[in-house]
Image (cartoon, helix red, strand yellow):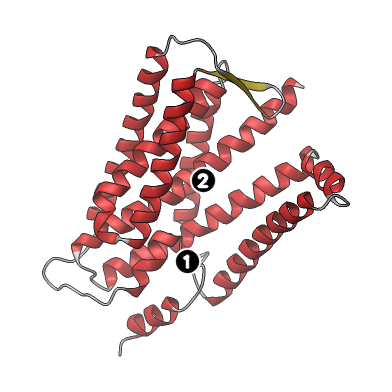
């Protein structure tokens, strides 16, 4: 058995080796000698999903421009960002969120649906991103461009760190990533449970109103998302080197776009917090 095959099998049984989409790729046993996945194929399909994300953004702008209904609800995002919604806008936005979540789950658990569910997921995320940038951040739309540039920088840096071998998706790396994920989930779970207990609820509320703490937690989330890119790159390498059938290029591309959008939203959230603090 080759070294590459042994390493691949070892990674198969490791938690948090990649995001949910790519982690399921590690369980594939099919191989193809004549029509195998390639880096170029994965890159093309990744570009397709990103293009569909842009289409989702354009769709949101068209919906926003067509809405001339009276304000139904005004929602405060952080302290100084508010968004006014008509009833139809709120319904459409909620439907897009639900559709994106359902398509995400279908893409994870039913790989054959990824060309369709991945496309719909990318479109839904584009709609959400456009809503945040052009509706919630009205007057501060430049933050969307800043978040995009920072996301490109993060992806480029993590790609360089992986390709140069400075960071490897080995056992030590996965242990660190697992510890960070467990720590992040643990803090969220304890905060939720604390908010349900009357004796600890004021303490939890005070913590959540602490700007330094919330920013620190968001930075931790961004670090975790960025580290997941290393795992994603490793799984994509396996997909190509182990000669997975070409159909799995869709899953590899979907998984990578999933992480990139996650990073973008984390960066945008941080920029919103910093801007909100300056406004205060």
Measured from the top left, where is residue 232 in percent x and y? Answer: 42, 60
Residue occupied by mark 2? 263
Please tell me which residue lies in front, 93 or 251: 93
Q: Can you tell which of label 1 and label 2 is closer to the viewer?
A: 2
- Asked whether the residues under the numbered discs 1 and 2 touch, taking CB atoms below 8 Å apart as contact, a structural biologist would say no
**CA gap, disc 1 and disc 2:** 22 Å
Q: Residue at x 54, y 58 (%)?
A: 227
Residue 165 disc label: 1
Look at the picture and state if 53 lies above or below 110.
above
Instruction: Please indicate whether residue 214 sits to the left or right of residue 231 in the image.
Output: right
Q: Residue placed at 45% from the left, 51% from the top?
A: 259
Q: Residue 129, position in %: x, y?
A: 46, 32
Q: Is residue 142 above or below residue 23?
A: above
Q: Please name whichever residue, 180 or 59, is drawn nearer the observer in this view of the structure.
A: 59
Q: Residue sitting at 39 percent across and 37 percent down?
A: 124
Residue at the outermost left position:
34
Label 2: how many residues lie within 10 Å, few (<14), some (14-19) or many (20+)?
Answer: many
Residue 9 visible within the image: yes
Quadrant the C terminus occupies: top right
Tag of residue 155: none
The residue under the point 22% across, 54% down is 41
């Amino acid at each position: 058995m080759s070294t590459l095959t042994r390493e691949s099998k070892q990674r198969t049984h490791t938690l948090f080796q990649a995001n949910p989409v790519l982690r399921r790729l590690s369980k594939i046993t099919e191989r193809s000698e004549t029509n195998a996945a390639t880096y170029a194929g994965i890159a093309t399909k990744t570009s397709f999903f990103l293009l569909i994300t842009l289409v989702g953004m354009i769709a949101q702008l068209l919906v926003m421009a067509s809405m001339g209904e009276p304000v139904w609800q005004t929602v405060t995002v952080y302290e100084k960002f508010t968004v006014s919604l008509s009833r139809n806008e709120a319904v459409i936005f909620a439907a897009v969120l639900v559709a994106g979540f359902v398509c995400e789950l279908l893409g994870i658990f039913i790989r054959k649906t990824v060309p369709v569910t991945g496309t719909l997921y990318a479109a839904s995320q584009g709609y959400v991103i456009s809503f945040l940038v052009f509706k919630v951040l009205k007057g501060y739309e430049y933050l969307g461009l800043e978040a995009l540039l920072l996301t490109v920088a993060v992806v480029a840096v993590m790609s360089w760190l992986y390709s140069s071998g400075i960071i490897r998706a080995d056992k030590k790396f996965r242990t660190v990533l697992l510890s960070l994920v467990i720590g992040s989930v643990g803090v969220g779970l304890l905060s939720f449970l604390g908010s349900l207990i009357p004796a600890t609820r004021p303490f939890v509320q005070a913590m959540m109103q602490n700007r330094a703490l919330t920013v620190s937690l968001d930075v931790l989330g961004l670090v975790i998302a960025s580290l997941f890119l290393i795992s994603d790159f490793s799984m994509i390498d396996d997909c190509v080197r182990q000669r997975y059938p070409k159909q799995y290029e869709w899953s590899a591309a979907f998984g990578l776009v999933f992480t990139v959008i996650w990073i973008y939203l984390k960066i945008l959230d941080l920029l919103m917090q910093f801007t909100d603090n300056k406004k205060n």
